[in-house]
Image (spheres, rainbow, N blue to C red):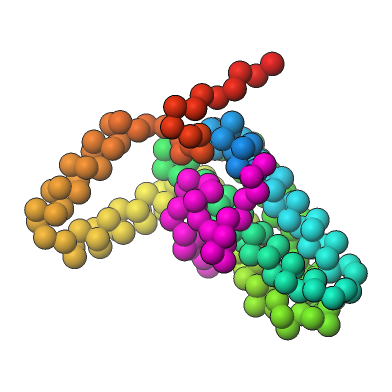
Amino acid sequence: MRRWVACLGLLAAAACPAANRDFLTAAEIDQLREIQEPDARLQLYAGFVKARMALLQQLTAKDKAGRSAQIREALEEYTSLIDAMDAVTDDALRRRQPLDAGIKAVVATETEMLAALRKISDSEPKDLVVYKFLLEQAIMATEDSLEMARTDLNTRSAEVISREAKEKRDREAAMRPEEVESRRAAEKKEAEQKRKVPTLRRPGEQAKEKP
């Protein structure tokens, strides 16, 4: 079953905190600022996910004092990255942008990550109780994301558009008529002014030229 992304700011890739803090490193944010195409961004995110898994495997391989807090932190970041990939994918589908290479990277990466997470769970480390819930959430997020990534893109695109339309109808049903008109006018203006991929560039910042 689809596990909906709880943090809408993930569409901006770095705005949503994991456990009240950023889940991306400064270096990762800099990399994303230079990559605007969602297809390429998904491949970047896949690399970030692998980095978190490498850290998790390193931490769980050796029993030492204080590792539980680090494992919890890595799991929180991992799950937020999975959610971010889902958000980037859905936004790209909404905008009808190509995702072939990105989706392949997501499927390959998440298949590998799911096996690794299950291996950690099956090993039953002695401090598992401290981060068991977060590990289960990471497994669930990966399972759901992988299921969606394996779904036909046309089907998933239709689901995204349908869900967005329903959410919009539900919001408008709770608003006064004048509020609805005002919101629609604002959305139309925003759509006309900003028809591009969400960016992490600062105001006025230009992409660096490739050598």
The region drawn magenta spans 1-27
The residue nearer to you, when weighing 158 against 181, is 181
Is residue 104 something one can see in this rendering?
no
Question: Can see residue 138?
Answer: yes
**Residue found at the far left of this picture:** 178
Measured as percent of width and height from the top left, residue 34 is found at 59, 31
22 drawn magenta: yes
Name the quarter where the C terminus is drawn: top right
Question: Viewed as shown, does residue 68 lie left or right of 82?
Answer: right
Residue 109 at x, y = what percent?
A: 72, 50
Q: Name the residue rendered at 57%, 50% in the picture.
A: 85
Closest to the observer, 95 or 176: 176
Give the x, y percent position of residue 84.
55, 52
For the point 57% across and 60% down, the residue is 21
Single out the residue that lies furthest toward the top.
211
Instruction: Specify whether 195 is left or right of 85.
Output: left
Q: In the shown orientation, is residue 79 left or right of residue 182?
A: right
Magenta: predominant secondary structure element? loop
